[in-house]
Amino acid sequence: MKKILIALIVYLLSSNVSFANKSDCSGIKKLSKEYLACKAKNLKEGANNINNKIKEGSANKTQQIKEGTKNIFSNIKNKIKKN
């Protein structure tokens, strides 16, 4: 569990939210409502993309854990039946 948490933290720190699917905000006057809205939209889209990647990764990992535990329990049941 600690390894998963550490890997998740490293992934989040290494990815940069501001570079994901940017809208061009350079033509808008800084410190205006439109500029702030554009920057907020970029940040929101980047955060959503990262959240989706995390969800997919965690879903895959939980599926792998489920399959692994099923295999372990089936092996244990087979050993118990043999004895």
Image (cartoon, helix red, strand yellow):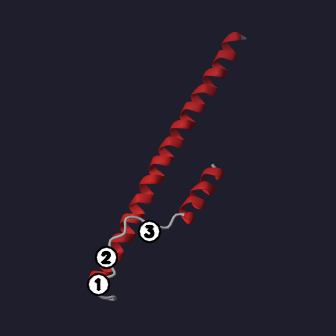
Where in the figure is residue 71, as x and y percent of width and height?
60, 26
For the residue pair 44 and 24, the one nearer the viewer reads as 24
Q: How many neighbours does mark 3 have within 10 angstroms: few (below 14), some (14-19), or many (20 or more)?
A: few
Q: Which residue is mark 2?
A: 38
Q: Quadrant of residue 12?
A: bottom right
Disc 1 is placed on an element classified as loop
Question: Residue at point 37% right, 69% down?
Answer: 22
Residue 31 x/y as whole percent? 33, 89
Along the polypeptide, which appears first: circle 2 or circle 1? 1
Q: Is residue 59 left or right of residue 44?
A: right
Q: Specify few, some or many for label 1: CA neighbours under 10 Å numbering under 14, 14-19, or 20 or more.
A: few
Disc 2 versus disc 1: nearer the observer: 1
Residues at badges 2 and 1 in contact (C-beta under 8 Å)? yes
Amino acid under disc 2: Cys
Label 3 amino acid?
A: Phe
State the image quarter where residue 34 is shown.
bottom left
For label 2, the SS is helix
Quarter of the image where one finds residue 83: top right
**At 30% across and 77% down in the image, what residue appears?**
37
Which residue is more in the foreground, 49 or 1? 49
Spatial CA span between label 2 and label 3: 13 Å
Q: Which mark is residue 19?
A: 3
**Whole-percent x, y for residue 20 in the image:** 41, 65
Q: Is residue 74 left or right of residue 19?
A: right
The three-letter code of the residue at mark 1 reads Ile
Residue 5 or residue 39, whichever sits in front: 39
- The residue that disc 1 covers is 28
Mark 3: secondary structure: helix
